[in-house]
Image (tube, helix red, strand yellow):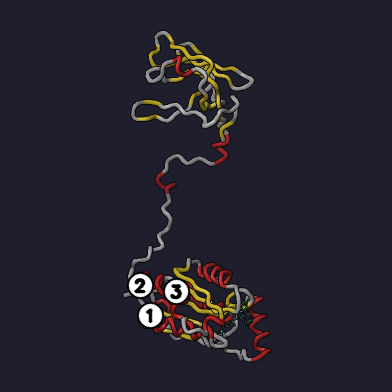
Amino acid sequence: MKKILIVYYSRTGTTKKVAETLQKQFNCDIEEIISAKNRDGFMGYLLCGREATLKNLPKIESNIKNPENYDLIILGTPVWGWNISSPIRTYLARNKSKFKNIAAFCAMGHDGDRQSFREIEKICGKKLIAKVGIKTKNARKENLEEQLEKFILLCDKFIKGEAEEKKPIENHYSKTENIISIDDFSKIQIRIGKILSAEKINGADKLLKLKVNFGGEERQILAGIAQYYNPEDLVNKECPFVYNLAPRTMRGLESQGMILCPSGENGPVLLHPDKEIQPGSMVK
Ligand SMILES: Cc1cc2nc3c(=O)[nH]c(=O)nc-3n(C[C@H](O)[C@H](O)[C@H](O)COP(=O)(O)O)c2cc1C
């Protein structure tokens, strides 16, 4: 069974109430962060607001429980100035490298929970496995457990090992050979050409001689598709061609480009634009 620790700071008791409700559900360890400063009353409110805005790291009493000994740390904080409270910020700064997995809840007057969750994820460099924001007035209601149901369910799944492990995204590039940069790619000009005529070449069973229109220009292009396509079927077809390939001579004929097509199991398959397009259009 995975071990959970709830760590929270509460100035006026709302976060504490949520933390204790969760603790009953999970029957897990719990630790309250104690601020070294007095934060009572109006002056306390101003102090909290200032620290939250400036992202200060005020003194807190040392924590007793070591987060390294837990599989999941559930963090609880009041929202201060649309962000996390400063004592929680200090706790995160001290312990962020010790967390294996994190979930979080916020107590708030109206909003600021999403920004607070983002801040926690940013500081810890980890995605929260579950998050919930509870409004102060709702925390007082009888149905607090119900409000926490989804959060509890997600944490439960994690405890039972059903939650998807946060695997690193598989890097398909590692399996791809000959990676090229965008600069390399941009050197290749691919254009749509309209085939005006196609004919067999004497003595070359594989090659067809194509006349291709690229808008203002007509080119001769040799294509190794003679065994798979009848010349008459190609006339008026639009296909992509490599347009800036150096010319080369085959069977005494110059080829001024190259037709692009995938190789299927039964030979090459021509590609055509989905809609009619001006010959010469660039493929990007
Ligand atoms: C300095 C300060 C700033 C606050 N800023 C926000 C805020 O930006 N958004 C919000 O919804 N509530 C804000 N609140 C209200 C608290 O988040 C809310 O009362 C919360 O329930 C308090 O939790 P606690 O009782 O655990 O301290 C702020 C409270 C304080 C003290």
In which quarter of the view is residue 20 placed? bottom left
Q: Position of residue 38 (x, y in %)?
A: 61, 91
Q: Are marks 3 and 2 in contact (CB under 8 Å)?
A: no
Of 122 and 163, which appears nearest the observer?
163
Of 112 and 250, which appears nearest the observer?
112
Label of residue 76 in the image: none
Check disc 2 and report the residue beneath it: 159
Disc 1: residue Cβ within 8 A of ligand 1's nearest atom: no
Tell me what residue is drawn at x 50 percent, y 76 percent: 105
Tell me what residue is drawn at x 39 percent, y 72 percent: 153
- For label 1, the SS is helix
Label of residue 98 in the image: 3
Label of residue 26 in the image: 1
Of 283 and 153, which appears nearest the observer?
153
- For label 3, the SS is helix
Q: Are marks 1 and 2 in contact (CB under 8 Å)?
A: yes
- Type of amino acid under label 1: Phe
Sequence-wise, which precedes: disc 1 or disc 2? Answer: 1
Tell me what residue is drawn at x 52 percent, y 68 percent: 121
Q: CA distance from mark 3 to mark 1?
A: 21 Å
